[in-house]
Amino acid sequence: MHNVAESITAESNIYLELTAAFFGIILSLYLFFNRKKSLRQFRILVYLVTLSDILDIANIYIVKVSSLPEMLKRLSSTLNYYCFALISYSLFCYIIAYMKPSDDIRVLRRTVIVSLILCTGTLALNMFFSTDTFTPVRNSIRVIGGFVIPIFIVTLSFYLMSVHHDDFTGTEFRTILIAYVISIAGSIIQIFTGASFAISYFPAIIAVYILYFTLETPDYRAMAELIKEYADAEKEACESSRQKNDLFAGMTHEIKKPLNTIIGMDKLIIMESDEPEVKDLAECILEKGENVLTVVNRVLEDARAEKESKS
């Protein structure tokens, strides 16, 4: 049995996959014991990538050992393909965790869930085909469930990133994009190398490590939360300032109208009255009224200038 395992390992060249599994387990354990210091969606993504890598390695041995039950080989093969869909869905959830809730995100999330259900049903049909036979139907099932639907979900994730790029900082957008490119490059290389060289999960583990050390370390998460709180406070202060200016503008307009009426009537009294005492009192009222009107106009101008500077 030991010689068989060595032969399969050498034949499939799974050394990079074994290395990826080792580092994936280390990161998974660290995140498990430090759950409060990273996004839940990121932890799930790391767990799935690591588990999928382990299942992929196990599937290579299970399928090539002829003495194992056929049903076990079918189940292993089906789960191996299904992991791609789960990882793509987990990546989608991780991406939208950075975005503000919106109607298009909710619609696309429902679309992704329907796609995942379709993938589950499609790959379930794989259980009815022997792992030793290669028929057009079986190949179509594997291509649709194992590649087409996961690529569709990943494409939707990238589409959301491009549409809602304002929800990401420059560092977040660039880092996630680099992780995308590395993971996709690994999948493309795996397609060309085939069964002779297992490599697909090694770039995926590199991608999650890049995401972790750039976006998910405790220091970065604390800084991101602080920036978010600052942005929310700034937005709240701007809204409060706008409401204050609107209130002042409304109040001063309401004060200005009757004040102009009083000043106008006071001027008529000065013009029409012949009594010196009445004229003196009217002129005093006119002076104070014009002073108040100057203050009101200044408040209006300041409110207007502040509104224009923030618009």
Image (cartoon, rainbow, N blue to C red):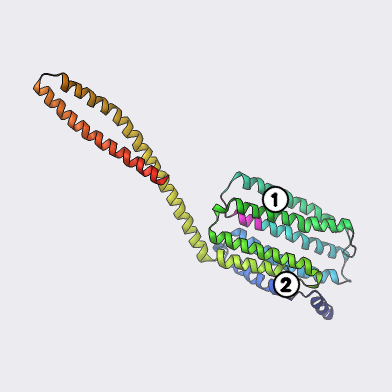
- State the residue position of label 2: 17
Q: Which mark is residue 112?
A: 1
Evaluate if marks 2 and 1 touch, with contact meaning CB atoms under 8 Å apart. no
Residue sticking out furthest to the front? 271
Q: Quadrant of residue 95?
A: bottom right
Q: Residue 86, position in %: x, y?
A: 71, 58
Is residue 293 rendered to the left or right of residue 69?
Answer: left
Q: Describe the element under mark 2 as helix, strand or loop.
A: helix
- Residue placed most toward the observer, 88 or 282: 282
Tell me which numbered mark, 2 or 1, is placed earlier along the sequence.
Answer: 2
Q: Quadrant of the C terminus?
A: top left
- Can you say whether 29 is above or below 172 in the image? below
Mark 1 Cα-neighbour bin, 10 Å: few <14, some 14–19, many ≥20: many
Q: Amino acid at mark 1?
A: Val
* SS majority, magenta: helix
Q: Residue at x 73, y 70 (%)?
A: 199
Helix, strand or loop status at disc 1: helix
Q: Amino acid at mark 2?
A: Glu
The crowd level at tag 2 (other Cα within 10 Å; few <14, some 14-19, many 20+) is: many
Q: Residue furthest bottom?
A: 3
Residue at 70% across, 50% down: 113
Q: Start and end of the magenta stretch?
A: 91-99
For this rendering, which residue is in front, 72 or 135?
135
Residue 200 numbered tag: none
How far apart marks 2 and 1 lie (CA) works out to 28 Å
Residue 272 pos. (x, y %)? 16, 18
Q: Is residue 239 magenta?
A: no
Quick check: 103 above or below 9?
A: above
Instruction: Describe residue 233's horizontal placement relative to residue 272 as left or right.
Output: right
> Which residue is drawn at the image coordinates 30% and 28% (left, top)?
257
Identify the residue shown where x is 76% and y is 67%.
190
